[in-house]
Image (tube, grey):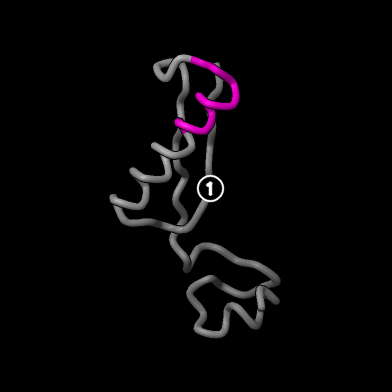
């Protein structure tokens, strides 16, 4: 059965809970698997340990430096 890993910046408990619930529900809907056979876990990375284009996610200019904008 599926084990789904999501890597993202740290989130609040409420956001993490909602994300896990929604991924589980969508997987159940699309694949028709029993809910108890779907595992979702989050690998959360602090913004100051995440880099794109050589810029740290904690840098105030991250959107421009990483070319996200």
Q: Residues within 10 Å of mark 1 (few under 14, many from 20)?
A: few
Magenta residues, as a range?
A: 24-33
Q: Which of 54 and 2 is in front in this view?
A: 2
User: Main structural element of the magenta stretch: helix, strand or loop?
Assistant: helix
Residue 21, image quadrant? top left
User: On the picture, is 65 further left or further right than 11?
Assistant: right
Q: Nearer the viewer, residue 54 or 21?
A: 21
Q: Which residue is at the far front?
A: 29
Disc 1: which residue: 7
Residue 12, image quadrant? bottom left
Image quadrant holding the C terminus, namely bottom right
Above or below residue 16? Residue 40 is: above
Q: Which residue is drawn at 47% across and 58% down?
A: 9
Total label count?
Answer: 1
Residue 11, image quadrant? bottom left
Q: Position of residue 18 (x, y in %)?
A: 36, 45
């Amino acid at each position: 059965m599926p084990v789904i890993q999501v890597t993202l910046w740290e989130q609040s408990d409420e956001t993490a809970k909602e994300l896990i619930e929604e991924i589980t529900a969508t997987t159940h809907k699309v694949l028709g698997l029993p809910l108890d056979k779907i595992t979702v876990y989050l690998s959360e990375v602090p913004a100051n340990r995440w880099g794109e284009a050589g810029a740290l996610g904690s840098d105030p200019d991250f959107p421009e430096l990483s070319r996200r904008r």
